[in-house]
Image: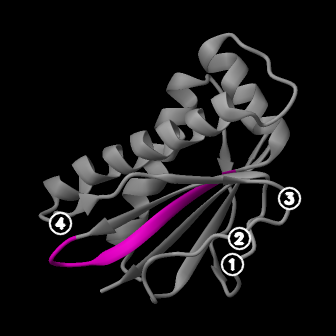
Amino acid sequence: MNVQFINPFLDSFLNVIGTMATITLTPGKPMLKEDELAKGDVSGLIGMVGEQAKGSLSLTFEKRLALKVMENMLGEAPNSIDEEVTDMVGELTNMVSGGAKKSLGEQGFEFDMATPVVVAGPEHHISHVSSGKKIIIPFNSLYGRAFIEICFEE
């Protein structure tokens, strides 16, 4: 997978969470992912299609981190992953993919984005829209972990 596609998503994710939720995330080592099992409790998934590439992005949060992001962004402290938390994860997915789209557009890569889908619950699955290799990058914070999955076929 072309690193030119990956870095804008990572940069956008760090920027969005750092700016909107004032939470510092520390990226871990990227790995290939072979299954569809999510590593956290709530995930946003968005498809992207363009002339140069077709793919998808997912953001997954462990419960504790998702709740802290909600608290920091909106001043509400839910006890569980409810409709407002899933809406927030969908909006974060939009913001991250939009930031990456802007950066990739400046490099000459254009694509359209679908509406994000949010899935929650223990051991939920993430089904990417393309058949390319899936890269997963873990992020650590004081409040738990988040994960980005990126899957593109070129």
C-alpha distance separating marks 3 and 1: 13 Å
Query: Which amino acid does the dot numbered 3 rest on?
Result: Pro
Of callouts 1 and 2, the N-terminal one: 1
* 98 relative to 125, above or below: above
C-alpha distance separating marks 3 and 4: 35 Å
C-alpha distance separating marks 1 and 4: 27 Å
Q: In front of the other: label 1 or label 4?
A: 1
* Circle 2/circle 3 CB separation < 8 Å: no
The residue where tag 3 is placed is: 122
Task: Pick the residue in front: 90 or 100.
Answer: 90
Query: Which amino acid does the dot numbered 1 rest on?
Result: Glu
Looking at the rendered structure, the secondary structure element under dot 4 is loop
Of callouts 4 and 2, the N-terminal one: 4
The residue lying at 16 percent from left, 61 percent from top is: 107
* Circle 1/circle 2 CB separation < 8 Å: yes
Task: Please tell me in which quadrant of the rendered image residue 147 appears.
Answer: bottom right
The residue where tag 1 is placed is: 36
Magenta-span inclusion, residue 63: no
Q: Farthest residue toward the front?
A: 83
Of callouts 1 and 4, the N-terminal one: 1
The residue lying at 78 percent from left, 37 percent from top is: 81
Q: Please identify the quadrant where the C terminus is shown.
A: bottom left
Query: Which amino acid does the dot numbered 2 rest on?
Result: His
Looking at the rendered structure, the secondary structure element under dot 2 is loop
C-alpha distance separating marks 4 and 2: 29 Å
Query: Which amino acid does the dot numbered 4 rest on?
Result: Phe
Q: What segment carries the magenta color? A: 50-60
Task: Pick the residue in front: 2 or 56.
Answer: 56
Q: Is residue 9 left or right of residue 51?
A: right
Q: Please identify the quadrant where the N terminus is shown.
A: bottom left
C-alpha distance separating marks 2 and 3: 9 Å
